[in-house]
Image: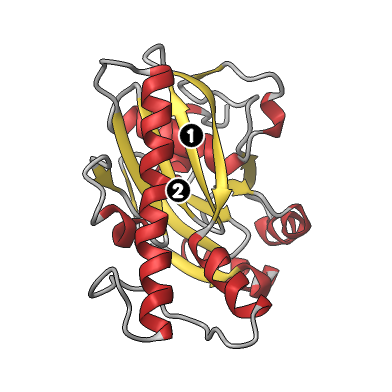
Amino acid sequence: MSASGTYLLIDISNSFTKAAFAWRGRIGRPARLATAKLTSRWLQGLQKKREAALIVVSSVVPDKNRLVRRAAGKAEVLWLGPRLELGIGIDYPRPESIGADRLANAVAVTALYGCPAIVVDFGTAVTFDIVSERRTYIGGVIAPGLEAMTNFLYQRTALLPQVSLREPRRAVGKSTIEAMRSGAVLGYRGLVREIIARIRAEQFAGRKVHVVATGGYARLIARGLPEINAVHPHLTLEGLRIVANLNQPG
Protein backbone atom coordinates (compact mmCIF):
# COMPACT_ATOMS: atom_id res chain seq x y z
CA MET A 1 0.00 0.00 0.00
CA SER A 2 1.06 3.62 -0.41
CA ALA A 3 3.19 5.00 2.39
CA SER A 4 0.28 6.78 4.04
CA GLY A 5 -2.22 4.02 3.30
CA THR A 6 -4.24 6.62 1.40
CA TYR A 7 -4.90 7.17 -2.30
CA LEU A 8 -6.01 10.34 -4.04
CA LEU A 9 -8.36 9.52 -6.90
CA ILE A 10 -8.92 12.10 -9.66
CA ASP A 11 -11.43 11.76 -12.49
CA ILE A 12 -11.08 14.55 -15.07
CA SER A 13 -14.02 14.58 -17.47
CA ASN A 14 -15.00 17.16 -20.06
CA SER A 15 -17.51 18.93 -17.80
CA PHE A 16 -16.44 18.22 -14.21
CA THR A 17 -13.46 16.95 -12.26
CA LYS A 18 -14.16 14.75 -9.24
CA ALA A 19 -11.57 13.88 -6.63
CA ALA A 20 -11.70 11.75 -3.50
CA PHE A 21 -9.38 10.22 -0.97
CA ALA A 22 -9.65 6.46 -0.76
CA TRP A 23 -8.40 3.48 1.15
CA ARG A 24 -8.20 -0.13 0.10
CA GLY A 25 -11.86 -0.87 0.80
CA ARG A 26 -13.67 2.45 0.40
CA ILE A 27 -13.66 5.97 -0.99
CA GLY A 28 -14.29 9.17 0.94
CA ARG A 29 -16.71 11.93 0.02
CA PRO A 30 -15.81 13.31 -3.43
CA ALA A 31 -15.13 16.97 -4.19
CA ARG A 32 -16.31 18.32 -7.54
CA LEU A 33 -15.15 21.24 -9.67
CA ALA A 34 -15.92 22.38 -13.21
CA THR A 35 -13.00 21.12 -15.30
CA ALA A 36 -12.63 24.53 -16.94
CA LYS A 37 -11.79 25.93 -13.47
CA LEU A 38 -9.36 23.15 -12.53
CA THR A 39 -5.98 24.45 -11.30
CA SER A 40 -2.88 22.91 -9.79
CA ARG A 41 -3.53 25.02 -6.67
CA TRP A 42 -6.91 23.28 -6.15
CA LEU A 43 -5.23 19.89 -6.49
CA GLN A 44 -2.39 20.90 -4.18
CA GLY A 45 -4.97 21.98 -1.62
CA LEU A 46 -6.42 18.47 -1.68
CA GLN A 47 -2.98 16.89 -1.34
CA LYS A 48 -2.16 18.98 1.73
CA LYS A 49 -5.17 17.55 3.56
CA ARG A 50 -3.79 14.00 3.69
CA GLU A 51 -0.62 13.84 1.56
CA ALA A 52 -1.49 10.66 -0.30
CA ALA A 53 1.61 8.93 -1.67
CA LEU A 54 -0.30 7.44 -4.61
CA ILE A 55 -2.49 9.43 -7.02
CA VAL A 56 -4.61 7.54 -9.55
CA VAL A 57 -5.98 9.56 -12.45
CA SER A 58 -8.62 9.03 -15.10
CA SER A 59 -8.41 11.87 -17.61
CA VAL A 60 -10.11 12.54 -20.94
CA VAL A 61 -8.83 16.14 -21.06
CA PRO A 62 -5.10 15.93 -21.94
CA ASP A 63 -4.57 19.69 -21.54
CA LYS A 64 -5.27 19.35 -17.79
CA ASN A 65 -2.83 16.50 -17.16
CA ARG A 66 0.11 18.84 -16.57
CA LEU A 67 -1.79 20.33 -13.60
CA VAL A 68 -1.82 16.91 -11.93
CA ARG A 69 1.91 16.43 -12.52
CA ARG A 70 2.62 19.88 -11.08
CA ALA A 71 0.49 19.24 -7.98
CA ALA A 72 1.70 15.69 -7.31
CA GLY A 73 4.98 16.64 -5.65
CA LYS A 74 6.66 13.45 -4.41
CA ALA A 75 3.55 11.34 -4.85
CA GLU A 76 3.54 8.62 -7.50
CA VAL A 77 0.97 9.14 -10.24
CA LEU A 78 -0.80 6.27 -12.02
CA TRP A 79 -2.57 7.25 -15.24
CA LEU A 80 -5.37 4.80 -15.85
CA GLY A 81 -4.89 3.01 -19.16
CA PRO A 82 -4.85 -0.44 -20.74
CA ARG A 83 -1.24 -1.18 -19.72
CA LEU A 84 -2.07 -1.21 -16.01
CA GLU A 85 -3.38 -4.29 -14.22
CA LEU A 86 -7.15 -3.83 -14.41
CA GLY A 87 -8.59 -7.15 -13.31
CA ILE A 88 -10.34 -7.46 -16.68
CA GLY A 89 -9.21 -8.32 -20.20
CA ILE A 90 -9.59 -6.07 -23.25
CA ASP A 91 -10.83 -7.28 -26.63
CA TYR A 92 -10.62 -4.09 -28.66
CA PRO A 93 -8.57 -3.20 -31.77
CA ARG A 94 -6.82 -0.13 -30.25
CA PRO A 95 -7.01 -0.38 -26.45
CA GLU A 96 -5.17 2.92 -26.00
CA SER A 97 -8.10 4.71 -27.68
CA ILE A 98 -10.58 3.68 -24.96
CA GLY A 99 -11.42 6.58 -22.64
CA ALA A 100 -9.84 6.13 -19.22
CA ASP A 101 -13.18 6.77 -17.52
CA ARG A 102 -14.77 4.01 -19.58
CA LEU A 103 -12.09 1.54 -18.50
CA ALA A 104 -12.56 2.60 -14.88
CA ASN A 105 -16.30 1.97 -15.17
CA ALA A 106 -15.70 -1.47 -16.65
CA VAL A 107 -13.28 -2.34 -13.84
CA ALA A 108 -15.72 -1.18 -11.18
CA VAL A 109 -18.85 -2.86 -12.54
CA THR A 110 -17.03 -6.19 -12.83
CA ALA A 111 -15.66 -6.04 -9.28
CA LEU A 112 -18.80 -4.68 -7.60
CA TYR A 113 -21.66 -6.26 -9.59
CA GLY A 114 -20.23 -9.11 -11.68
CA CYS A 115 -20.42 -9.82 -15.38
CA PRO A 116 -21.63 -9.80 -18.05
CA ALA A 117 -22.44 -6.16 -17.52
CA ILE A 118 -23.38 -2.91 -19.23
CA VAL A 119 -22.41 0.45 -17.74
CA VAL A 120 -24.43 3.50 -18.82
CA ASP A 121 -22.55 6.69 -17.93
CA PHE A 122 -24.58 9.90 -18.23
CA GLY A 123 -21.91 12.52 -18.75
CA THR A 124 -21.20 15.13 -21.44
CA ALA A 125 -21.82 12.17 -23.74
CA VAL A 126 -23.74 9.10 -22.66
CA THR A 127 -21.52 6.04 -22.99
CA PHE A 128 -22.45 2.38 -22.88
CA ASP A 129 -19.58 0.02 -22.02
CA ILE A 130 -19.83 -3.75 -22.14
CA VAL A 131 -17.99 -6.43 -20.20
CA SER A 132 -18.47 -10.01 -21.39
CA GLU A 133 -19.06 -13.07 -19.22
CA ARG A 134 -15.32 -13.74 -19.59
CA ARG A 135 -14.51 -10.49 -17.73
CA THR A 136 -13.38 -8.82 -20.94
CA TYR A 137 -14.10 -5.29 -22.12
CA ILE A 138 -15.50 -5.71 -25.65
CA GLY A 139 -16.57 -2.21 -26.71
CA GLY A 140 -19.47 0.17 -26.38
CA VAL A 141 -21.72 2.89 -27.71
CA ILE A 142 -21.38 6.69 -27.54
CA ALA A 143 -24.38 9.02 -27.94
CA PRO A 144 -24.89 12.76 -27.26
CA GLY A 145 -25.39 13.66 -23.62
CA LEU A 146 -28.77 14.82 -22.37
CA GLU A 147 -27.62 18.33 -21.50
CA ALA A 148 -25.76 18.66 -24.79
CA MET A 149 -28.98 17.90 -26.69
CA THR A 150 -31.11 20.44 -24.80
CA ASN A 151 -28.39 23.11 -24.94
CA PHE A 152 -28.16 22.60 -28.72
CA LEU A 153 -31.88 23.43 -29.06
CA TYR A 154 -31.45 26.54 -26.94
CA GLN A 155 -28.37 27.74 -28.83
CA ARG A 156 -29.62 27.01 -32.34
CA THR A 157 -33.21 28.25 -32.17
CA ALA A 158 -34.55 31.78 -31.75
CA LEU A 159 -37.55 31.06 -29.53
CA LEU A 160 -36.73 27.97 -27.44
CA PRO A 161 -35.52 28.71 -23.88
CA GLN A 162 -32.87 26.99 -21.79
CA VAL A 163 -34.49 24.24 -19.73
CA SER A 164 -33.75 22.83 -16.28
CA LEU A 165 -34.03 19.08 -16.52
CA ARG A 166 -36.40 17.22 -14.23
CA GLU A 167 -39.21 14.68 -14.45
CA PRO A 168 -42.00 15.96 -16.71
CA ARG A 169 -45.51 15.99 -15.23
CA ARG A 170 -47.02 14.64 -18.43
CA ALA A 171 -46.01 13.65 -21.95
CA VAL A 172 -47.99 16.46 -23.60
CA GLY A 173 -46.56 19.79 -22.48
CA LYS A 174 -48.81 22.80 -21.88
CA SER A 175 -45.96 25.26 -22.36
CA THR A 176 -42.77 25.42 -24.40
CA ILE A 177 -40.66 24.52 -21.36
CA GLU A 178 -42.92 21.57 -20.43
CA ALA A 179 -42.83 20.33 -24.03
CA MET A 180 -39.03 20.55 -24.16
CA ARG A 181 -38.66 18.84 -20.78
CA SER A 182 -40.95 16.01 -21.92
CA GLY A 183 -39.06 15.59 -25.17
CA ALA A 184 -35.72 15.61 -23.40
CA VAL A 185 -36.41 13.22 -20.52
CA LEU A 186 -38.91 10.85 -22.13
CA GLY A 187 -37.11 10.91 -25.46
CA TYR A 188 -33.78 10.23 -23.82
CA ARG A 189 -35.20 7.24 -21.98
CA GLY A 190 -36.29 5.92 -25.36
CA LEU A 191 -32.76 6.31 -26.72
CA VAL A 192 -31.24 4.51 -23.72
CA ARG A 193 -33.88 1.74 -23.75
CA GLU A 194 -33.32 1.01 -27.45
CA ILE A 195 -29.52 0.90 -27.17
CA ILE A 196 -29.68 -1.43 -24.14
CA ALA A 197 -32.13 -3.69 -26.00
CA ARG A 198 -29.85 -3.90 -29.03
CA ILE A 199 -26.78 -4.66 -26.90
CA ARG A 200 -28.68 -7.39 -25.04
CA ALA A 201 -29.93 -8.97 -28.26
CA GLU A 202 -26.52 -8.82 -29.93
CA GLN A 203 -24.33 -9.94 -27.04
CA PHE A 204 -26.40 -11.52 -24.26
CA ALA A 205 -29.54 -13.05 -25.75
CA GLY A 206 -31.35 -15.09 -23.10
CA ARG A 207 -28.72 -14.37 -20.42
CA LYS A 208 -28.78 -12.27 -17.29
CA VAL A 209 -26.75 -9.08 -17.56
CA HIS A 210 -26.06 -6.43 -14.92
CA VAL A 211 -26.99 -2.93 -16.16
CA VAL A 212 -25.57 -0.17 -13.95
CA ALA A 213 -25.95 3.59 -14.45
CA THR A 214 -23.66 6.36 -13.27
CA GLY A 215 -23.06 10.04 -14.02
CA GLY A 216 -24.94 13.28 -13.54
CA TYR A 217 -28.38 12.37 -14.89
CA ALA A 218 -28.30 8.69 -13.97
CA ARG A 219 -30.97 8.89 -11.26
CA LEU A 220 -33.34 11.02 -13.32
CA ILE A 221 -33.25 8.80 -16.40
CA ALA A 222 -32.99 5.44 -14.59
CA ARG A 223 -36.12 6.26 -12.57
CA GLY A 224 -38.26 5.34 -15.56
CA LEU A 225 -36.13 2.50 -16.94
CA PRO A 226 -36.62 -0.94 -15.35
CA GLU A 227 -33.86 -2.14 -17.69
CA ILE A 228 -31.33 -0.45 -15.36
CA ASN A 229 -30.69 -2.59 -12.28
CA ALA A 230 -28.67 -0.14 -10.17
CA VAL A 231 -27.45 3.44 -10.00
CA HIS A 232 -23.93 4.01 -8.62
CA PRO A 233 -23.06 7.73 -8.55
CA HIS A 234 -19.31 7.26 -8.03
CA LEU A 235 -18.63 4.19 -10.16
CA THR A 236 -15.67 5.77 -11.97
CA LEU A 237 -13.94 6.65 -8.70
CA GLU A 238 -14.57 3.12 -7.43
CA GLY A 239 -12.81 1.86 -10.54
CA LEU A 240 -9.82 4.05 -9.74
CA ARG A 241 -9.74 2.70 -6.18
CA ILE A 242 -9.73 -0.89 -7.47
CA VAL A 243 -6.96 -0.08 -9.96
CA ALA A 244 -4.94 1.45 -7.13
CA ASN A 245 -5.30 -1.80 -5.17
CA LEU A 246 -4.13 -3.83 -8.18
CA ASN A 247 -1.10 -1.63 -8.98
CA GLN A 248 0.65 -1.03 -5.68
CA PRO A 249 4.07 0.64 -6.01
CA GLY A 250 6.88 -1.82 -5.39
Q: Residue 172, relative to residue 212: is it above or below?
A: below
Q: Residue 144, relative to residue 42: is it above or below?
A: above
- CA neighbours of label 1 inside 10 A, class few (<14), some (14 to 19), many (20+): many
Quick one: label 2 or label 1, which is nearer the N terminus?
A: 2
Q: Name the residue rendered at 65%, 75% in the picture.
A: 37
- CA neighbours of label 2 inside 10 A, class few (<14), some (14 to 19), many (20+): many
Residue 217 occupies quadrant: bottom left
Residue 81 % position (x, y): 63, 33
- Please give the label number shown on residue 129: 1
Residue 67 % position (x, y): 73, 61
Query: As rendered, which of 196 and 55 lies closer to the eye?
Result: 196
The quadrant of the image that shows the N terminus is top left
User: 165 left or right of 227?
Assistant: right
Residue 28 % position (x, y): 35, 57
Tell me the amino acid under the disc marked 2: Asp
Query: As rendered, which of 121 and 160 lies closer to the eye?
Result: 160
Disc 2 is placed on an element classified as strand
Q: Residue 163, relative to residue 209: is it above or below?
A: below
Q: Is residue 193 visible?
A: yes
User: 132 left or right of 44?
Assistant: left
Residue at which label 2 appears: 121
Tell me the amino acid under the disc marked 1: Asp
Residue 5 occupies quadrant: top left
Mark 2 and mark 1 in contact? Answer it, CB < 8 Å: yes
Q: Name the residue rendered at 35%, 56% in the picture.
A: 218
Q: How far separated are the C-alphas under marks 2 and 1? A: 8 Å
